[in-house]
Every structure is written in C-alpha cells, then in structure tokens.
Image (tube, coloured by chain):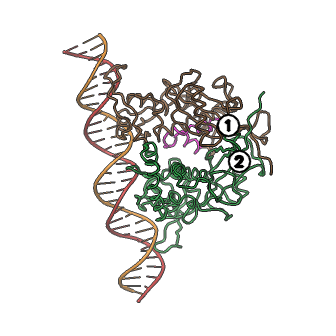
Chain colours: A brown, B green, C red, D orange
Amino acid sequence: MTHKTLYPTDIITVLITLGETSPQLMLLHHDQNSPSLEGNHYSLQRSLRHWVETLTGCSIGYMEQLYTFAEPQKGGSSTTTPHIHITYLALTNHLPLSCHSHLYRHFPWEDRRSKSGNQQLENFIARIRLWADERTERQSRIATAFGLDGLPWDDTRVLERYELLWESGLVPRIPNEHVDANTPNLRDERRLLATALARLRTRIRYSSAIFDLLPPSFTLLHLQQAMETLSGRFMHKPNFRRLVLHQKLVEETGRQDNSAPGRPAKLYRFCPSAAASCYLGAAFLPLE
Amino acid sequence: MTHKTLYPTDIITVLITLGETSPQLMLLHHDQNSPSLEGNHYSLQRSLRHWVETLTGCSIGYMEQLYTFAEPQKGGSSTTTPHIHITYLALTNHLPLSCHSHLYRHFPWEDRRSKSGNQQLENFIARIRLWADERTERQSRIATAFGLDGLPWDDTRVLERYELLWESGLVPRIPNEHVDANTPNLRDERRLLATALARLRTRIRYSSAIFDLLPPSFTLLHLQQAMETLSGRFMHKPNFRRLVLHQKLVEETGRQDNSAPGRPAKLYRFCPSAAASCYLGAAFLPLE
DNA sequence: TATATTATGCTCATAGTGAGTATAAACCTT
DNA sequence: AAGGTTTATACTCACTATGAGCATAATATA
C-alpha cells in the first residue's frame, strides 16, 4: 500500500448580506484551529453551516459549495504540494457582527448603477482593447465578457472580467490589502470574491435565493432594490412587479410599509410553493 | 506556528463522449501514483487536461471543475480526517480507448426517451410518494425533482432525483459494482456521476458545449440527436432547426451527408463567433 | 385644496416558442 | 420511367413573455 498524497486544506465560507448600496461580505476561515467538521459531503455542509451560525450569530439561508482553489505554498516551487481551499457561499438576511466589507469596493466596475463604476469600466475597456491589440482570441473574450460588439452585458460574467483585467495588468496582481484582519492566506482573494459574486448573481436570477437576503416581510420595491444591488443594474419597476406577481412568488401580508413618503406600499412575504421554477432575470433597464 | 490540517486528496476526471443512445463516460483517477500537477488553480486545470489527453489519446474540449467531495476514510469514524476528491468534468468528441460505460446504465430513469426508463420512473414515483407519506417537506422536494403537481420535468435536476431515491432507499445505498477496474475509492460513485450529468445537461443548454462532443462537421439531425441523448428527451425537429439557425450557431460547409436514406442533409460546422449567447433549452417535445 | 411622491395598474408592439402542416430532394421498387 | 418511401427543409398560426411607456391611486405636506 502506497502513501496517500496529503494536502494542507482549509474551508473558506463567503458569507453575504445585503447592505444599503452594496452586498456585504465576510470571510470565515475554517482551519486547524477550528473544531473539526463531520467527514462526508452530506454532513460537511450541514456542520459547516452550524459552525458559521454559532460563530457569527446569524441564521444562514441558501448555501452551496463554490469552488476548490489550489495554490502553491508560500516559498515553494510550483510543483510542491499546493494548498487546497474549499470554498462555500452562504447567504443571511441579518448579521449581528459588523466586521464585513462592501463587495463593490473590490469591484467598482461591477456596479453599473453608479456613475463612477461606469466610468472606471469605460476606462478599463479602452485600455484592455489596447492590450488585446489585434489578437482575435483576446478580442472575442473581451467582447463576451464586457458586452461589446453588439453582445449584451451579462452581469454574471464577473470572473471572466476579473481574469481579463488581471491578465492585462489593469488590476494589481499582488493585492496589498486584505478584506479583514483574520483573512485566510489565499494569494488572490479577489478571485474568490469574483467567483462568489458570479455565483450569487446566477442564483438570484434562476432561483429564489434573493429571499434569503431579505427580511420575512418586504415591499416590492425592497425586493427590486435587492435585485438591483446584487446584479448591479437598475430594473424597470412595472415590469419587475409583473414578473414577480405573475409567478406568484410572493403573497400579501395584509400590512403596509408607512416608513417611506408617498403612497404606502403593501408588505409581502415569500411564497415558497412557487419557488421551484423561479426566474427573475428579466425587466432590467438598458445600460449607458 | 501550528500544524496545517492535512487531508488525503485525489483528483477524479469524468470524461464524457457521445455514444449511440447514451452518453459514455470514463473515470480517470489522479492520485499519488500519477505525475504531480502544477500547483495553482490557473495551471492545475491545464496540466490536468494535458495529463488526461496523453493518458487517453483524446483531445479535450470543454472542461470545468465539478465539485469537491469529502468522505470518511475507510474504517474511520465520522470525525477522522476525511478523504478529499476534487472532481472535474471533461468533454471529448473522440475517445480511442474503449473502457468506458453507458451513463444511463446507472440512471435508466434519466432517459425519458426509452419505454423502460419511463416505466422505472413511474414505478419510482409511486413508491417514493409512499415514502414521503404526508410530510410536505418531502412532497415538495419530490414534486420539483420529478416534475409533478403541474411542475415541469427539469432534466438538469439529476442530483435532486438521485438524492431522493437514495434517501428513500429505492436505489441500493451501497453499490456492489464499479464502473471499471481502476475506479477510485469513492464510496458512492453514482453521486459523482449524477453531479456530472446534471452539470453536463446545464452546460449543453446554456453554452455551446454540445459542439465539443460532435465531429467538426455534422448534420442538424446529428446535432439534435446529440442534444436528445444528453438531455434524455426528444425534440421537435422543425423548432430545433429554427432555434439553431436563428442563433447563427452553425454555418454550411457546402457538403452533404449521403450515408442516410432519404434526402441528403447538409453538413454544417460550428460557428464560434455566435457562441457567446448560445441557448438550446427550447424545442423539447412534451413527455409521456 | 393643491402638489409632491410613491405605489399600483394598464396598453401596445414585438420576439420567442409550441404545435402542426407543406414542399423538396434523394433513393427504391416495379 | 412512374410511383412510393424516406428524410430534409420551409412555412404558418396562436400564444406567451418581454420591453417600453403611460395612467391612475393613495398617502403626506404645504
């Protein structure tokens, strides 16, 4: 019997909450100092969920495995056994702790609602086209990633965009700052965050995951703004309402929200019975 | 400095080809006996691709990481350090080796084209409803997974279906046979295969991955039958043609296919320029 | 009472889809 | 050579979802 190859492995959870204008995130690093988790994939996610919940005091809704990253150990050559980072995405509607950070601070160009984000994006596109030069391979990657040459902007292509910016040197290759103090030793942490944002945007589009980021009752505008914050795009209000109501995704609570000016909005609650075939990927307003 | 937690880790590649009536698969197990791979996630997939290609003599098209499974080591309790299996999905249009197996042999109920598959599914549904009893939690999982109570059949929910069948005991919990001789020691290998089939069906629906399973030139019927084989459903021929041609996914080669009886069909080739916003998830015929 | 502000409801043109039918081009049989 | 079989390809029609914009309702405030 030969020896098994042993890799240093840790588990990183990207915990997402909804902020005012940006998704908030918190990284939780499960490693050798943490209590050991159950050992099979059925129970691993369950016990990881419990560990995160007790550590942060929040209640996690949607959770899924994101990606497994491998990176060379510090100082080692590229063929020494790499570090393994198994990463998870978790959503919560309330986080008692406050040591989290704005996701769009790391990716301002992913927020197409803001003037500054659009300007930075425009700047990037101009410069990355120079980098691409005449190479058609690069040009077509750029076109699909950034929605050029008649192709539409796809908010879920976060990772493609980040990789192109990284390759072209438009974002610094070695980050000199970290998300928070107890950050894991992932060399390029933004790659993980880009993966998380991409997955998140896919999930809120094709599943009812958005409701795990909202309080139990909400107005349709709250729901719309949550979608807008996460997708980084504005939506058409009447069409968004039609989209949600037509699918019977929500039901009236009978109460109203009087905190805002104007006509008070009805409060709704999520209707899980219609969640199976949920689709919220329409009703976006055109960009620029 | 504390010790890092070390896990025995291997990499399993699920290599998929197109057979006559079923997807074919081959599992490739990269472990301590294999040459070591490059250590970061950029190069890991690249060197894994190269390793698989030289080992099998095929040329891999689409490739992506699937999922990372953890399972307790044999004989160990549930809290000892688990085995880690990092798994990848890879597609090829030609495999010189012949030691592969029919995917639907493991999941006959996933092939809705065959009489026997439909009958087994019907049988399963009847029996799993008894298992669910009055528990609404289980009932709703069953309804979305199997497309009951007015919900549509979703061919990508392979894993949900397999998990329900596993939990209810309708498929044996400990498999007594293996896919091939040099199979990895994954306790429940069918779970990996179900994950692979689910991902595969999603990819051919929303990307141009199907063309990596076809030869360079093909008729529209070849293309349709490839989609039918992988999704396990029949499609509406005129509508499928319209779907493909309208998106300009293919272009004529000028040649014809005279091997089949009847009017000869035009041979087409894939048109990568239109691949960015590829969608082949329509034109399915109704079931039953 | 008038006005601002927001919620909610409605219309209309268009594109995509499901379902079915009609024609075209090959071969085979007699 | 004529007619039939088989498959490819083209077309029609109804319906639904969507994009875009407009109209009305209900509250607060001046």
Q: Which residue is mark 2?
A: B74
Q: Which mark is residue B120?
A: none
What kind of secondary structure does the magenta stretch mostly adopt? helix
Residues in magenta, as a range = A139-167
- Local crowd size for mark 2, using a 10 Å CA cut-off: few (<14), some (14–19), many (≥20): few
Residue in the foreground of this view, choosing between B197 and A157: B197
Quarter of the image where the N terminus of chain B is located: top right
Question: Depth check: B241 or B182 in front?
Answer: B182
Nearer to us in this view, B55 or A157: B55
- Write down the residue under mark 1: A85
Residue appearing at x 53%, y 73% in the figure? B259
Left or right: C1 as drawn, with respect to D20 = left
Question: Rounded to the nearest whole Å, what is the CA distance between mark 1 and mark 2?
Answer: 23 Å
Residue at the location (42% across, 31% down)? Answer: A223
Q: Mark 2: which amino acid? A: Lys
Marks 1 and 2: same chain? Answer: no
Which secondary structure, mark 2? loop
Instruction: Give x and y (percent) for residue B241.
Output: 44, 60
Q: Is residue A127 above or below residue B31?
A: above
Chain letter belonging to callout 2: B
Contact check, label 1 and label 2, Cβ < 8 Å: no
Q: Is residue A80 left or right of residue A139?
A: right
